[in-house]
Amino acid sequence: MKKLIMLVLVLAYALILSAQQTFFKPEKMVETGVYYYPEAWNPNQWDRDFKKMSEMGFEFTHMAEFAWAQLEPSEGVYDFKWLDKALELAAKNNLKVILCTPSATPPVWLVRKYPEVLVEMPNGQTGQHGTREHYSWSSPKYRELTTKVVEAMAKHYANDKRVWGWQIDNEPSHYGALDYSMAAQISFRVWLKNKYKTIESLNNAWGTTFWSGVYSDFNQIELPNANRLYSGIASPTSMVDMKRFNADECASFVSMQYNILHSIISKSQFVTSNFMHGHTDVDPWRNKDLDFISYTMYPVAGYTKGVGDQGFRMGDPWRISFANDFFRPVNGVTGVMELQPGQVNWGTYNPQPYPGVIRAWLWNAFAGGLDFICSYRFRQPLFGGEQFHYGMVGTDGVTELSGGIQYSQFMKEIRELRKIYVPNVPMPKEYAARKTALLYNEDNVWETSIQPQTFQWNEINHITKYYSAIKSLSCPVDIVGEDRDLSAYPVVIAPAYQMVDRTLIAKWKNYVENGGNLVLTCRTGLKDRDGHFFEAPWADAITGLIGAKIAMNDMLGADMKAKVEFNGITYFWKTWGDMLDPESGTETWATYTDQFYAGKASVVHRKLGKGTVTYIGTDADDSKFEIAVLKKVYETAGIGVKELPEGVIINWRDGFWVANNYSSSNLTIDIPKEAKIIFGTKELTPAGVVVWK
Ligand code: GAL
C-alpha cells in the first residue's frame, strides 16, 4: 500500500514538474505581466506603451480578451492584422504574450442573427448586447460559433513563439446568476437523464412526494427558479442539481475550448482560464483538465472591513493566501491572472488602497507559490464601463500611478531574489510538520445556501474563518477535495461538511486510525449526497467517529449572544451550536455556560487508533475561539505551531519566508537571529512586508 502511495506521489510530482518546466522556469520563480487592450488605443501609441511596460519591468502582456468584434467583424471574416501588429510590437519590447479567446463578449452581428444564444435571467429577462457573459453555455449555436473563432485564432497563432499561453473566456460565470434559457432547459433534461436514468430514481432523489411534486416524465421538468417558487422550494435537491448542472455546463464550455486549442496549438503554449476567487455559481475545480487554473483577485472594493480602522484599504488578511491555496493544489501550478492595480470602479464604494499594499499583495501572491502574476490593466480607460478603474499608468497614458510604481519595485526585487535562488530547497521541517488540508466541496456551499436554517449561516464565511485560524497558527495549507490522498497531511479539517457518504466517513476513519488528526465542525455529516437526512439517529454517520452524540443544535438572533467556555475563557456565539453528549473515553474541551443547555459539551476530542478526532460544534462570533481550539488540537498531537498577531500572514516558498502585515498597527515579526533579512525589517508598518531566508 505504502509503495503504491509513493508511486502515486512520485507520478503526481512528475506531472507538476513537467507543467512547471514546460511553461515556467523554476529559477524565475514568478513572472509578472499586465493587460493591454490595443483595440482601445491609437495604434501610434502601442509601441510607446509596450516600451513603457517593459521599462517598468513587466515580462509579458495579455491581449484580445474582449475583442471578438475586432477579430471577426462579420460572420466568417477574420481580421488578425491588428493583433499581429500588436504582437510584433510586444515582442520587439521583450514582452511575451498571453492571448485570450473572446467568447465572453459576442459581437452584435452574432446576437442579432442568433438571438437564441442569449442567457435568460432568473427574472425572465433575456440578456442584451452591451454587456459580457450574456451568452448561454448550453447553446449549441454559441458553441458552434465559439468553436469557429477559437479554431481560427488557434490556427493563426499555433506555432507563434511570441505566444506564451492562452486564457479561455474571462471569469467564466454569469456573475452569480443562473441561466434559464431554452437551451439550458433542453440541456438540463439531458443532464438529468444521464444522472438518474429513470424518472423514479429522480423522484426518489428529489423527494417529490413532498407537496405533490411527483414527475412522470423528464420532459415535465423545468429549471428550478427560486424567483418563481413564491412559497418556498419543495425540493432543495432539485436546486442543488440546478447548481451542479450550471457548473457542469460552464466547465464543459471551457473544456470544449481547451480541446480545440490543444488539438491545434504547439505544446509549448499553455492553456488556462481565470476563475473568480470566491464566486460559487460555478466550480473552478471542475476544470482540472486545463494545464492549470488561474484566478482573479480584487482585495479592496468596499466589501470588507479587514483588520483595524485601515483594514478596508488592505483587504482581508486571508484572501490572497486562500486563493493561492485553493488553486495551486489542483495540479501544483497556478497564477493570478488579474490582480487589483489600485482604486477600482465597481465596488459598493471604491476606496484608495493603503499606501504600499499593492506591493504587499504581490509579495503575498508570490509567497503562495504562484508562477505568474498579471495586473489588471496597463492604462486607465478613458471611456467605457470601467472609467474610474486605475491602471499602472493614468489617463494620460504615461504617468505611473501608485500601483505602477509599486509593481516596478516588486519586479525589481524579484530580479534581485532570482540572483540568490537555489533550486529544490525542501520545506523547513517544523513548517512541513504543520501541513494542513482543508476539505472543500462546492455541494456543501450550495446545499447550505438553499437551506441555511438561520439567515446568519454563510458556509464560505465559516470555511474562511477556519482557513484564517489555521493561517494565524502559521501553518501551510492545501485546500483540497475529498478525493485527495490525506496521508501527507498531519492535520485535516472538514468545516461544516454537511453532505457525506459512508465511503467518505470510512476514509476519514482510516486516516485517523493511521495517525491523522481530523477536525470536524458543526453541520458535518448530517445529509447524504442527495441532501436527505439518514434514516438513523441524528448525525449517525459521524457519531461513531467523533465519540459523541449530537443531542440537538441551536441558534440565536442577530443581536443576541450565548456563551461557551474553553480553557477558562468565555466566548460568544449565535450562528450555530451543537449540543454534544460525549461517550466514555471522549474528552469534553468546551462547554456551554448559559441557555437551558448549560453544561452540555460544545467541543469534544478523542483518540482513535494512532490519531485523534476533534469535533467543534459551535460557530463562534469571532475566530478567537476557533484559533484557541485548533491550537490545542495541534499541540495535543505534538505539532508545534506559532500564533501570529491578528492580521499577519506568513508563507514560505523556494527557501524564502514572507510576512505580510494586514493590520492597521505597527507590529514586530519574530524572525530568528540567524535569518538573513532580504527586503524590509522585522518592524512592520500597516501593509508592510518582510522577506527573509
Ligand atoms: C474583473 C474582470 C475584468 C475587469 C475587472 C475590473 O473581475 O475579469 O475584465 O472587469 O474585473 O476590476
Image (cartoon, rainbow, N blue to C red):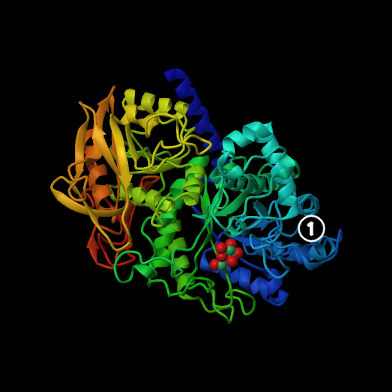
Q: Residue at x 61, y 76 (%)?
A: 381
Quadrant location of the N terminus in the rendered image: top left
Image coords of residue 136 (percent x, y)? 71, 55
Q: Residue at x 36, y 43 (%)?
A: 476
Image coords of residue 320 (percent x, y)? 43, 56
State yes or no: Cβ of the residue under disc 1 lies below 8 Å from any atom of ligand 1.
no
Residue 259 seen in the figure: no
Q: Is residue 81 left or right of residue 455?
A: right
Q: Quadrant of ligand 1?
A: bottom right
Q: Nearest the camera: 412 or 308?
A: 308
- Please name the amino acid that badge 1 sits on: Glu
Answer above or below: position of 24 versus 76: above
Residue 225 seen in the figure: yes
Q: Which residue is mark 1?
A: 116
Q: Residue at x 62, y 72 (%)?
A: 49
The quadrant holding residue 23 is top right
